[in-house]
Amino acid sequence: MSEQNPELQQDDIGKSLVPLQSTQEHEMAPAVLDTRPSFYEFAGLDQEIAQLTEFGAIFNHPELAREWDVEVPTGLLLCGPGGVGKTELVRAFSRELGAELIEVAVSDIQSMWVGKSNELLRQVFNNAGEAEGKVVIFFDELDGLFSANAGGNSGVSTALISELKMILTHLRENQPNTIVAASTNSLSGFDEALLRPGRFDMVLQIGKPNDAARAGIFGSYIGRKFELYDLGSGELDSRVGGTIELSSLAAATDGMTGADIKSILHSARAKRLMAHIQQGADLAPVTQHDILLAIRHHRQQRPNATN
């Protein structure tokens, strides 16, 4: 995993709220805000984001890629344990690409009837093909197809995998505006034929964040709601900001993921709010002590969080 400087620039806060409509459309209707995250919101994933940026750049310049005999990628597979941000990273990638995102749960296309699942899968791609611009189709937890009990019918699962292989093989030719992304917790038992070039061209392994990355994640989440935390002078870095010391928080959350950190901070804020509602306590900013208590509670409630 790459390391990222956990310093947070407060000027960056709110940059993710970007209007999706043109100026003329804006005059006619309220702007629609894109709620997908941006790459700048992630910490500790510099190398992975650099690879995704390269993927998108080549996809956006197919003619130049052909001139240089470089294959235009169409398939992206993110592999890693739950909570490391695979889904959010795909959402950010689709936003940076300027593409529509279609999220598909594997369970939504599985049917007890052989052939019905294939029809549902083809419909997903047909819908993407009707879009005017670029589209990212995201299959969350694709490894569900390889479960012994996937869909309650191994024949359905096998047929669906075969259909997906065929679609991916011809995707660049049939739907050049479409990228297929998928997530999986493990490549164990994964159909190796899906990993061949021309299908899932890029496989990103995403592990749990290291100390520097966790400090960056704390800084990113706290910075989005900095007014709710005791930052003293308003500065936030890896050393100290008011009572908030990111390096200590990172050390206290060894083995945890970004999802764990998000839950911990939510718990600390909720604790302050409930004290005000139930006891009339002052709504003072969240402190380092509050967060450390939330970390301890999180470990007690989720003993497997660090496994």
Image: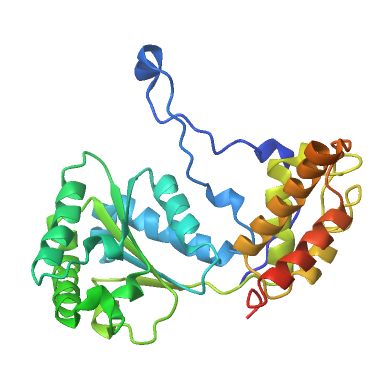
Please report the residue visible at 39 percent of the width from the left and 60 percent of the height from the top.
Answer: 55
Residue 172 drawn above or below residue 82: above
Picture quadrant where residue 207 is located = bottom right
Where does the image place residue 141, in percent across and percent down from the top left? 38, 68
Please report the residue visible at 77 percent of the width from the left and 43 percent of the height from the top.
Answer: 274
Residue 92 drawn above or below residue 306: above
Where does the image place residue 80, in percent across and percent down from the top left? 49, 74
Q: How many marks?
A: 0
Where does the image place residue 22, in percent across and percent down from the top left? 37, 23
In front: 153, or 265? 153
Quadrant in the picture for the C terminus: bottom right
Please report the residue visible at 15 percent of the width from the left and 59 percent of the height from the top.
Answer: 120
Residue 235 shown left or right of residue 206 in the figure: right
Picture quadrant where residue 113 is located = bottom left
Residue 12 shown left or right of residue 268 in the figure: left
**Extreme top residue here?**
27
Residue 120 shows up from this direction: yes
Quadrant in the picture for the N terminus: bottom right
Where does the image place residue 3, in percent across and percent down from the top left? 67, 67
In front: 270, or 71? 270
Residue 197 shows up from this direction: no
Picture quadrant where residue 281 is located = top right
In front: 270, or 134? 270
Please report the residue visible at 25 percent of the width from the left and 53 percent of the height from the top.
Answer: 178
Residue 297 shown left or right of residue 42 in the figure: right
